[in-house]
Image (cartoon, rainbow, N blue to C red):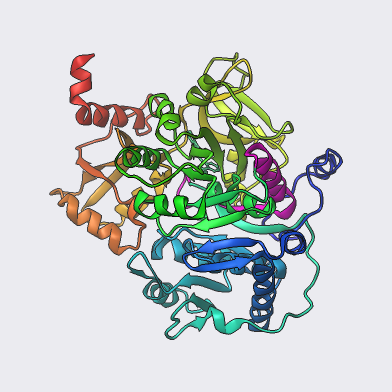
Amino acid sequence: MLTGFTPWPEEWADKYRKDGCWKGETFGGMLKERAALYGNQTAVTCKDVHWTYKELDERADRLAAGLHKLGIQKEDRVVVQLPNIAEFFEVIFALFRLGALPVFALPSHRSSEITYFCEFAEAKAYIIPDMHSGFDYRALARQVKDKLPDLAHVIVAGEAEEFQELSSLHREPVQLEDISPAEVAFLQLSGGSTGLSKLIPRTHDDYIYSLRISAEICGLDQHSVYLAALPTAHNYPLSSPGVLGTLYAGGRVVLSPTPSPDDCFPLIEKERVTITALVPPLAMVWMDASGSRSDDLSSLQVLQVGGAKFSAEAARRVKSAFGCTLQQVFGMAEGLVNYTRLDDPEEIIVNTQGRPMSPFDEVRVLDDDGRDVAPGEAGHLFTRGPYTIRGYYKAPEHNERSFTADGFYQTGDIVKLTADGYIIVEGRAKDQINRGGEKIAAEEVENHLLAHPAVHDAAMVSMPDDFLGERSCVFVIPKGEAPKPGELKAFLRERGLAAYKIPDRIEFIASFPKTGVGKVSKKDLRETIAQKVKPAEIKQS
Ligand code: OOB
């Protein structure tokens, strides 16, 4: 078993098998079965590339043989940073068949994040596109290689330059070792709340269970067409039910290069898309665009919105804008995913973030002292279940804090439960900013800023924003004369931080407000900046 992975205790694993959650499927086997059932149906569409299930299955086998020849073996970690392109699927299924573990980086990550993933996971390979959205990933790979000369392979989908070209790896399939469904299939990324993102080990058993239930709840079948508008590597478009849930159901995945209406609306019309997933700010952009464009979106049956809180006012407008059902999705890469059901009453769909997908999900809402609160009262959300991890990868100290002794994961979310068990997200206790669905660990950015010679101390908080829900604001105590905000932002960019983590606003301050025990009071800092950015509303109230 993978070192650094915390498995479910044996009695729980037995229970989840007996209860019929874990059926012993693996990703490699699942694709083989789908290829047998739906061989000539299209699995993946990307521009004018259409791969049938049979073609995808064969490509995965041939690529697995090539990666095997390169020396990629069972349990080797491979950082995969691919955008929404067809190759994403042959790569991940080839790795699944080898038992090698994709580490799912996002296309927006830059050298700071990628170097850390490669180093922490001791990656054998790093797989990238040549160019995407005007960015050259080979230049990024060079920066990573400079810092990590031992990184064995950089593999490029497209023009490889000095690296290894993905398409050149295809070989005659070879016999591979069997993979156990109880083993880790890949590592997802946490949003992070303390320092850098943690890696999340997900097994074949647990993830495939979540796909099966998600596909059922979303009514997916072989006629479904899922549009991947968000980057497929993220847990939400990957599995809720996402691209993998769609393949599980025998449906068709359509890939969009960006989530903009300009790219997505014509694809919905052309490919007769039935379901797609967005984060709240994009849902708002799509609703605005739907009024002024004439694309035929009538095939769309379900629009999922999640990743960050969707306001009830906006939620109410979805049905009239698209003539389809809204589904709110509240999930986390660590496991638990909640959905409103397609036949729920309008008031539930608009006002709640759904209820757990599985009857075996356990959720508890506790007060600060660890006591269960009454329904309707806000508290800390804890969860345990057949697809919620029992520990982060190689993070024993962090696991002590994030998991209770009996295996509940402390989500860091503040929620209320309705009498019917639906969840309403009220806020967050973790030190994280949710920038329209993109998560930023305050401490990670603060640590980078502390490396600047003119920064004495830094504290990052969220500030309210009509469009993204939240943006980031960092309060900086300068050393001597305050530097220019632009200089600090450029400094962070030069350190290779992803663009979404660069603070939206920088405020200089002489000292931080403190809590009773002398810690920096982020609550006070949040209030200070909220008053500054929302003067009009505050005057009215
Ligand atoms: C999804 O996954 P992550 O890992 O990027 O972020 C998880 C966190 C949650 O703990 C919560 O703080 C926030 O994102 N969140 C929401 C939300 N959905 C996620 N907060 C309010 N309302 C929502 N609907 O974001 C994710 C994973 C799978 C499915 C959907 C989202």
Residue 422 shown left or right of residue 207 in the figure? left
Q: Is residue 207 magenta?
A: yes
On the question of residue 167 being in view, the answer is yes
- Classify residue 184 by image quadrant: bottom right
| Residue 521 appears in the figure | no
Residue placed most toward the observer, 247 or 366: 247
Residue at the (22%, 19%) spot, across then down = 538
**Picture residue at 73% right of the left edge, 41% below the top:** 386
Q: Position of residue 494 (x, y in %)?
A: 29, 64
Q: Which residues are magenta?
A: 192-219
Residue most extreme to the left: 481
Q: Position of residue 143 (x, y in %)?
A: 38, 73
Is the residue 535 above or below the residue 509 in the image?
above
Residue plotted at (51% across, 39% down): 304
- Could you tell me residue 46's position as x and y percent? 50, 64
Depth check, front residue: 194 or 202: 202
Looking at the rendered image, the quarter that the C terminus falls into is top left
Q: Report the side of 239 relative to 536 (left or right).
A: right
Between 87 and 445, the one nearer to me in the picture = 87
**Which residue occupies 65% across, 44% down?**
220
